[in-house]
Amino acid sequence: MCHRMSPLLLRELQEGLKYMQVTGRAHVPRRDPSIVVPDAYPGSQVPLFVPSDDGKLAATELTWGFPSPAQGGRTVFNTRIETALRQATDGRGMWVTPITNGRCIVPVRAFYEWWTQPGTPRAGSDGEASGKRSRRPQVAFQLAGHRIFLIACVRQGERFSVVTTEPNASVASVHNRMPLVLGPGESSVWLGNDWPSLADRSAIQLDRELCE
């Protein structure tokens, strides 16, 4: 269950799009270390990429989380890809329109998960299991070899939700779900017709760091 991520600024996404239009390659300039961007949580306004009417990407900001009447109005901020695929096939459910017509992508520097699996490490450890503590820590994940990476999302109106899937080897010892992290070249797959093929994230390598 992804509940926290480190997003980019809207202007960084806009600069990245301009660079892509000129060079054909994706690139976001390195951020000035003095600029501190708060992490995003459900309810935050988050910059992300959405397909525009001409088939290109556009940068915008949406609110993280859908209100769910079925759950007493509680905000639903993650979307299980298994559920979305089943609802898309059946043609009914709250995720039919978002997964069919609202797939989008959010660039991040990291996402975070609570350590909920057995063997919680102690604060200050190197991230491997070494005991138990009363308060579960959080773990920051990044795509190995990349300072910025993409997470698959769905949107409807002014809101979006992070798509989750079964955890791979990098995440499974920490949490029982993970965001659907996109590898290089996979954004076009997620935004195209073959998006169900991305449910398996076993080939994605993630670095992780225990948060104090």
Image: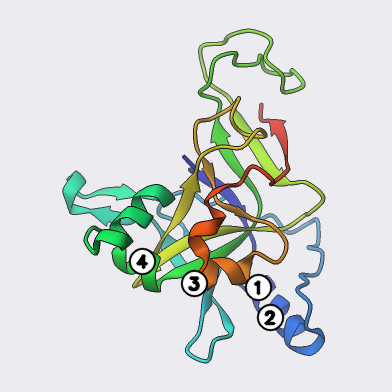
Q: Nearer the viewer, mark 4 or mark 1?
A: 4
Label 4–label 3 contact, CB within 8 A: no
Q: Which is nearer the N-term, disc 4 or disc 2?
A: 2
Cβ–Cβ under 8 Å for marks 4 and 2: no
Amino acid at the residue labelled 2: Leu
Q: In the image, what residue occupies the spot 53% across and 73% down?
A: 192
- Density class for disc 4 (Cα within 10 Å; few <14, some 14-19, many ≥20) is many
| Classed neighbour count for the residue bearing mark 2: other residues with Cα under 10 Å, few (<14), some (14–19), many (≥20) | many
Is 46 placed above or below 136 here? below
Q: Which mark is residue 98?
A: 4
Question: Residue 194 location in percent, x, y?
Answer: 52, 67
How far apart marks 4 and 2 lie (CA) works out to 24 Å
Q: Nearer the viewer, mark 3 or mark 2?
A: 3
Whether residue 182 sits left or right of residue 31 in the image: it is: left
How far apart are labels 4 and 1 at the CA level?
22 Å
Residue ID for mark 2: 17
Can the viewer see residue 80 in this picture? no
In the depicted structure, whether residue 49 falls above or below residue 22: above
Q: How many numbered marks appear?
A: 4
Q: On the image, which quarter does residue 140 sit in?
A: top right
Identify the residue under disc 3: 193
Query: Gap in Å between the C-alphas at discs 3 and 2?
Result: 23 Å
Q: Amino acid at mark 3?
A: Asn
Side of 149 where 58 appears, left or right: left
Question: Which labelled disc corresponds to residue 13?
Answer: 1
Badge 3 element: loop
